[in-house]
Amino acid sequence: MSNISVSQVNTKKEMRAFVRFNYELYKDCPYAVPNLLEDTLETLDSQCNPAFRFCEAAFFLARKDDRIVGRVVAIINTRANERWNKQEVRFGWIDFIDDPEVSSALFDAVAAWGKERGMNRMVGPLGFTDLDLEGMLIDGFDQLSTVFTIYNYPYYPQHLAKLGFEKEAVWLQRKVFVPTGEHVANNSKYFRIAQMVQQRYGFRLRHFKNKSEIKKGGYIHKLLGVINRSYSDLYGFSQLDDKQIEWYASKFMTIIDIRFLSVVENKDGEIIGVGICIPSLSTAVQKAKGKLFPFGWWHFLREIYLKRKHRILDMLLIGVLPEYQEKGANALFFADIIPLCVSGGFEWAEAHPQLEDNRAGQMLWKNLDCCIHKRRAVFAKEI
């Protein structure tokens, strides 16, 4: 008889244990970057996260001999299901020890919960929205993770394959090297493309003096609005409404670095594209062990503002409105960011995950020195 039990999280103490299980499982892994404790607790709190207005969720912990050995969130996003005409229960924040009985018990709990609510498929890892963590790592286990992506051990996808899951979507991540010497991304031809686009279409770059200017003009909301429209036809997309944009805006304002915020406007001054980058926080979060308080904030402050040279730039979001994606608006973004990376001593940038079948997204990198160093996937199974 199995000594594994799965129970639903019902108390704040259990929720903290749910979040901290990831820290314990990966505490000795040099590539894993823990989720921020405070941010994760807020995301999973129905009183804080506006996605709970159209999402239902249940949180499960697996125990073996009274020791926590796994966790998972089951989510039904009614907005996404209606948008894509599906009856899916999502699984997210999935972690488990290398024990097939544990992973099987967790997915059984998600399946049972979903079936009780009329769902017929299980899919994940996905969050409440596309700005949450999504996609299980399937390649690149020896690469440093980021604060905004999932890291998992190689045995995870192996367990899913044995349980009958199949890949439904694949994301690619690139290591984009800061160009030097005679590389096309570092010579005058590349920047002439940006100048040509500006002259032909009247596109222009907008920069900000400080965060106060961004707040006063409501620009962070406008930027997320562009992201909202840019991603609208991508896999599993769940439209963000005004309350969600407001919520995510407050989060982005705490980490945004105006030096690496590139905004492209059309000739009428309307925002048509955005690139949001920050110096990598991976090492800082590892040192802080995923907690801002009481002393974790110091590692963040040092990494963003006090460190003289950085190795890695994280590209958090890049989005161009669909009607402008074939007009070279992205050239302005790279013409803006490359000199900053060169002068800042960066070695390479971590590109955000992009769907393998997103042709426009994959074309962004054609003139840059880069390599695919990570792959991640969403898996699905009938229930």
Image: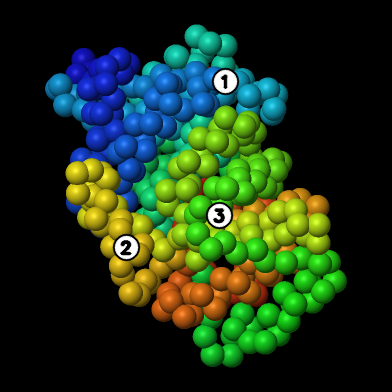
Reading the image, the residue beneath label 2 is 303
Marks 1 and 2 close (CB-CB < 8 Å): no
Give the residue type at disc 2: Glu
Which residue bears the numbered disc 1? 54
Q: Nearer the viewer, residue 273 or 286?
A: 273
Q: Is residue 132 above or below residue 120?
A: below
- Choose the circle earlier in sequence order: 2 or 3: 3
Name the side, left or right, on which 180 lies relative to 15: right
**Residue receiving disc 3:** 213
Eye-nearest disc, 2 or 3: 3
Q: Give the secondary structure at mark 1.
A: loop
Q: Position of residue 281 (x, y in %)?
A: 36, 57
In the rendered image, residue 46, in percent from the top left (x then y), is placed at: 43, 21
Which sits earlier in the primary sequence, circle 1 or circle 3?
1
Q: Label 1 sits on what residue type?
A: Phe
Q: CA distance from mark 2 to mark 3?
A: 24 Å
The answer to whether residue 134 is left or right of residue 293 is right
Query: Does residue 26 appear in this view?
Result: no
Give the amino acid at mark 3: Glu
Residue 207, by quadrant, is bottom right
Query: Tag 2, which secondary structure?
Result: helix
Q: Residue at x 45, y 72 (%)?
A: 348
Task: Give the residue at the far bottom of this rendering.
Answer: 182
The picture places residue 181, in percent across and down from the top left corner, at: 54, 90
Of 211 and 202, nearer the camera is 211
Q: Nearer the viewer, mark 1 or mark 2?
A: 2
- Give the number of the mark in front: 1 or 3: 3
Quote the CA–CA distance across marks 1 and 2.
37 Å
> What is the residue that sits farthest to the left in this orientation?
65
